[in-house]
Image (cartoon, rainbow, N blue to C red):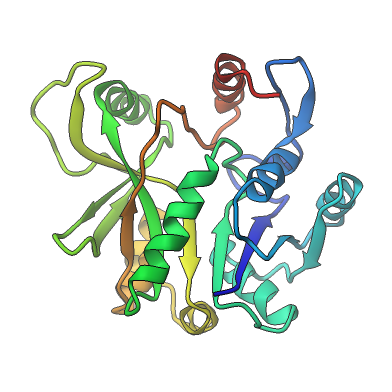
């Protein structure tokens, strides 16, 4: 099956305008933009046929082409990354069997997260969309809870059934757990990793579905699939002692830089 990775990137983020062009300093002291780091993460994934940056902003296009990325221009009306991926895939001929949405705010996404995701979708012939989930340890869960207490948008969590079909995604910490967990202790909470793999038919249909109340309330694009009766396969991935975080707020910049320094990433 042919695989396309699309990195959707927009300049006019509500929470963090200009986010794709924010510079992040790695362990060597070298600074690279968020979009370049996300592109490098995508290029490190094995068995991928093509990687493109999808944007509606010429500042992002110029920056991406300067470091060697292929860019597909999309419209300003795309409401989220999934709609932008759908438009980009259509623009290049809708020729791929699997389209991966590797969002441009997750430069620390390990390649095996995406590789395991693609393998999971390939193995589940009846699945239309798949997304990775990572079991939280106590330190991560406590960090999520601290973010919510202080009104910050932290990680998204996911709950799913026995067949790994998603039941719900939320920016709140779900499921509720009364117990307090130690830093290294495994918890029943799963961090949703913001990467998606789509079958082309489901991706093409997505922009035509109405935005439902849950997507509107949570601000989570994947809920549109659930609200329209489509199943979402959750693929559990392993951290392998690799730290992972997304750039959601300006306060996350030093957090990501500290993680890159600790892991020795350029």
Image quadrant assignment for residue 82: bottom right
Instruction: Depth check: give the residue in front, 159 or 30.
Output: 30
| Farthest-out residue, left | 178
Image point (40%, 67%), residue name: 121
Which quadrant, please, contains the N terminus?
A: bottom right
Q: Is residue 145 above or below residue 174?
A: above
Figure label count: 0
Side of 47 where 176 appears, left or right: left
Q: Is residue 192 above or below residue 97?
A: above
Image point (43%, 73%), residue name: 211
Find residue 102 and report its horizontal and vertical position in percent. 57, 54
- Can you see residue 80? no
Q: Is residue 138 above or below residue 14?
A: above
- Can you see residue 178? yes
Instruction: Depth check: give the residue in front, 114 or 220.
Output: 114
Image point (13%, 60%), residue name: 162
Which quadrant, please, contains the C terminus?
A: top right
Find residue 108 and report its horizontal and vertical position in percent. 56, 35
Side of 133 where 105 appears, left or right: right
Find residue 103 and report its horizontal and vertical position in percent. 58, 52
Instruction: Depth check: give the residue in front, 39 or 216.
Output: 39
Side of 242 where 182 appears, left or right: left
Find residue 93 and report its horizontal and vertical position in percent. 72, 84
């Amino acid at each position: 099956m042919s695989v396309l990775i699309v990195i959707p990137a927009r300049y006019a983020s509500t929470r963090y305008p200009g986010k794709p062009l924010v510079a992040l300093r790695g362990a060597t002291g070298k600074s690279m933009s968020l979009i370049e780091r996300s592109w490098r993460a995508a290029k490190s994934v094995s068995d991928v046929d093509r990687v493109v940056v999808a944007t509606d902003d010429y500042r992002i296009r110029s920056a991406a082409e300067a470091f060697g990325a292929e860019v597909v221009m999309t419209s300003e009306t795309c409401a989220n990354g999934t709609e932008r991926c759908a438009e980009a895939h259509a623009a290049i001929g809708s020729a791929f069997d699997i389209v991966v949405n590797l969002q441009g705010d997750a430069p620390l996404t390990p390649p095996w997260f995406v590789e395991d995701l693609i393998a999971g979708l390939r193995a589940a012939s009846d699945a239309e969309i798949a997304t990775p989930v990572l079991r939280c340890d106590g330190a991560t869960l406590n960090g999520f809870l601290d973010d919510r207490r202080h009104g910050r948008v932290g990680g998204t969590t996911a709950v799913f059934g026995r067949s790994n079909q998603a039941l719900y995604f939320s920016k709140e910490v779900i499921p509720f757990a009364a117990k307090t967990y130690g830093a290294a202790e495994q918890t029943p909470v799963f961090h949703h990793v913001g990467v998606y793999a789509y079958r082309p038919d489901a991706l093409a249909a997505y922009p035509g579905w109405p935005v439902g109340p849950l997507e509107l309330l949570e601000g989570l694009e994947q809920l549109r699939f659930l609200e329209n009766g489509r199943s979402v396969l959750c693929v559990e991935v392993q951290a392998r002692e690799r730290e992972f975080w997304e750039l959601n707020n300006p306060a996350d910049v030093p957090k990501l830089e500290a993680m890159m320094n600790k892991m020795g990433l350029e």
